Structures are given as structure tokens and as C-alpha cells.
Image (cartoon, rainbow, N blue to C red):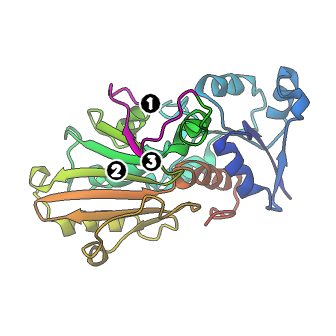
């Protein structure tokens, strides 16, 4: 028996990729709105209430409006926007974040899909905050640097880099942004790691379409117990042992790596974690596809868990 799924906003960057991952599956029946009725509020409300699951790929305000239209208590909602990522009555959809997170997702009717940058940051920091003995104190000041392909900015940013007729068209190879420290991803980074203070976030975008590197630098001599590089690596390795979509690269392999390609995991739902550095300073690095594990892949993974399907169905 198949589950009926409605992707509200399927024409956007994330929506299109989710549809591509689902349309060949026999256990999913995709429901779409008639293009002629896209602005028909009654038709949209009917579809939102007539399926087993809804995936919202909309701006924040539009996502909130969509949720307000759902009256059928049986409908499971996965929201890919920022609207509910720190809402206490929504479940954060990062299955590998803790040992009981999958169960929470499976039992929930309201699931917020994580942001791309927070996925990398939380994956690197959460194990250190949750370790016993504690390595990274909750009140430790943390910073995070990251670079993403321009697809992470949606249609507007894609046009800036690809469409020469766009008013904002640019040929720059690399640019920083989020200079006011008000980036919308910071609250979920802080809350879902348990940090007392928001991290200093330094994001950048490069002239390539997709792929992401997220990096957390740490002075190991500042951490509790002054751990060595191998100690930090061991904590991450134990935390993600047995995970299908999160890999901690062996320390022996990391020592021979000279650089990383941000496009290295494109098209997958994989998240690869590296521990670089010395016994005094570490660079914790996450590599992922911002449109994969950072968006559409995570949404499909959450859908599978929420509907009781095999977690990796439709994913690589």
C-alpha cells in the first residue's frame, strides 16, 4: 500500500530534488496541484488535508500559512523552511543528532527539516557537548566557518550567478555574507547543540552550484581535560557508529589529506566528518551536499522514518 504525499512548493530548488527522489518509488503516490489552481486557496487546502504526508518547500511565512490550513490530524508535515526549526512543539529532523531522535521523528506529526549549515555544525559539535566526560563546555565560545554552492540561496542567488540578465548578476568567484551575525541558521545551531551562546557564524558562497564545507576550529587546550586530537576523533567515531549516512573519516586517512572538494558528496545524502589538526588545535570539518543531506535528502529520510518506510529508500 502506497502513501500519498503532497509537495507544496515542488517547483522550487528543494521541491524539485525531493520530487526526483520520490517519483520512481512504488510506495509513494505523489499528489500535485493543477497548475491552473496553484493560487486557489480552497484547492490547496483540500490537498493539504487529503494526503498522508505534506512536505513544505516554501518561504517561512508561506509555510506557516500552509500549516494553519491543515485540519486533518492524521497528516504528517515536514517543513523545509526555517519557520519551525526551534519551535518546541515541532521535532527537529536530524535523525543522527541523538540516539532517540529517530523515535521522536517517527512519532511526530510535525517535523522541521534542518538547515544545511546547521546539519554540519550540529554533527560536529553535539557529540562534544554530550560526551561523558564533557569535552566542550556549554558556555564555551564557538565559531563556525562555511562555504556553500550558490544553489543554497534559492532562485534569486542562482540567477545572480547564472543569469547575465539578472540585475544582481555577478562574476565574483567567492563572497562572504551574513556580516551582521543575524543569519537565520544561528538559533538552531545554538539550541540543538545545547550551547549557552550563539556561535560566531562566518558563511561564504562560491561560484559553483552545490556542495558545502562546514568547519569548527577549536583550541584543544581550552577544552575540558585538554583532550588530544585522537580523543576528539574517538568521541565522534563512537557517537556515529553504525550510522548509514554519517561517516567519520579515520584519523589515519585524514592526516594524508591536503584539501577537500566541497562538491565531493554532491547528489548524495551522505555527511562526512573529518578531524584535522594537531594535539593543540583542531579543525573539525563536515562535508555534505547542501541540496542533499542539507535539504532534499534529509526531507526524504525524515519522510521515510515518519511513514515507517525503510530509512534509506530513494537515497544514496
Task: Name the residue tied to disc 3.
Answer: 148
Question: Nearer the N terminus, badge 2 or badge 3?
Answer: 2
What secondary structure is marked by label 3? strand
How packed mark 3 is, by other alpha carbons closer than 10 Å (few <14, some 14-19, many 20 or more), is: many
How packed mark 1 is, by other alpha carbons closer than 10 Å (few <14, some 14-19, many 20 or more), is: few
What secondary structure is marked by label 1? loop
Can you tell which quarter of the image residue 63 is in? top right
Q: Is residue 17 toward the left or the right of residue 253 in the image? A: right
Decide whether the magenta segment is chiefly helix, strand or loop: loop
For residue 217, above or below residue 230: above
The alpha-carbon separation of the residues under discs 2 and 3 comes to: 21 Å
- Give the residues in magenta: 167-184
The alpha-carbon separation of the residues under discs 3 and 1 comes to: 15 Å
Task: Name the residue tied to disc 2.
Answer: 126
Q: Position of residue 124 (x, y in %)?
A: 34, 54
Q: Is residue 146 toward the left or the right of residue 102 in the image? A: left
Residue at 41%, 64% in the rendered image? 240
Q: Quadrant of the C terminus?
A: bottom right
* 316, 53: nearer the viewer: 316
Residue at 48%, 67% in the rendered image? 243
Residue at 80%, 61% in the rendered image? 24
Q: How many numbered discs sit on the rendered protein? A: 3
Task: Name the residue tied to disc 1.
Answer: 184
Q: Is residue 12 toward the left or the right of residue 171 in the image? A: right
Question: Nearer the N terminus, badge 3 or badge 1?
Answer: 3
Question: Nearer the N terminus, badge 2 or badge 1?
Answer: 2
Q: Which mark is residue 162?
A: none
Is residue 15 a member of the stretch shown in magenta? no
Q: Is residue 254 toward the left or the right of residue 102 in the image? A: left
Amino acid at each position: 500500500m502506497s502513501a500519498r504525499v503532497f509537495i507544496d512548493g515542488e517547483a522550487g530548488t528543494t521541491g524539485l530534488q525531493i520530487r526526483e527522489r520520490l517519483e520512481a518509488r512504488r510506495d509513494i503516490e505523489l499528489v500535485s496541484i493543477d497548475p491552473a489552481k496553484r493560487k486557489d486557496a480552497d484547492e490547496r487546502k483540500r490537498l493539504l488535508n487529503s494526503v498522508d504526508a505534506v512536505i513544505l518547500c516554501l518561504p517561512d511565512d508561506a509555510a506557516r500559512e500552509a500549516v494553519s490550513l491543515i485540519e486533518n490530524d492524521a497528516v504528517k508535515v515536514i517543513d523545509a523552511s526555517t519557520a519551525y526549526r526551534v519551535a518546541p512543539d515541532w521535532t527537529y529532523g536530524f535523525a543522527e543528532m541523538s540516539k532517540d531522535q529517530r523515535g521522536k521523528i517517527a512519532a511526530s506529526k510535525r517535523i522541521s527539516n534542518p538547515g544545511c549549515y546547521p546539519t554540519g555544525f550540529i554533527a560536529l559539535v553535539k557529540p562534544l557537548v554530550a560526551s561523558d566526560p564533557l569535552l566542550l563546555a556549554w558556555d564555551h565560545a564557538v565559531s563556525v566557518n562555511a562555504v556553500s554552492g550558490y544553489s543554497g540561496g534559492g532562485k534569486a542567488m542562482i540567477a545572480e550567478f547564472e543569469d547575465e540578465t539578472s540585475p544582481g548578476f555577478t562574476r565574483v568567484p567567492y563572497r562572504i555574507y551574513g556580516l551582521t551575525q543575524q543569519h537565520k541558521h544561528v538559533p538552531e545551531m545554538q539550541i540543538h547543540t545545547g550551547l549557552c551562546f550563539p556561535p560566531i557564524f562566518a558563511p561564504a558562497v562560491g561560484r559553483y552550484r552545490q556542495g558545502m564545507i562546514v568547519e569548527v576550529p577549536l583550541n584543544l587546550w581550552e577544552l575540558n581535560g585538554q583532550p588530544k586530537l585522537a580523543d576528539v576523533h574517538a568521541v565522534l567515531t563512537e557517537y556515529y557508529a553504525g550510522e548509514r549516512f554519517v561517516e567519520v573519516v579515520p584519523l589515519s586517512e585524514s592526516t594524508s589529506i591536503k584539501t577537500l572538494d566541497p562538491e565531493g558528496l554532491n547528489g548524495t545524502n551522505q555527511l562526512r566528518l573529518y578531524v584535522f589538526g594537531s594535539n593543540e588545535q583542531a579543525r573539525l570539518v563536515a562535508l555534505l551536499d547542501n541540496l542533499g543531506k542539507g535539504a532534499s535528502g534529509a526531507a526524504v529520510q525524515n519522510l521515510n522514518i515518519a511513514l515507517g518506510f525503510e530509512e534509506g529508500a530513494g537515497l544514496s
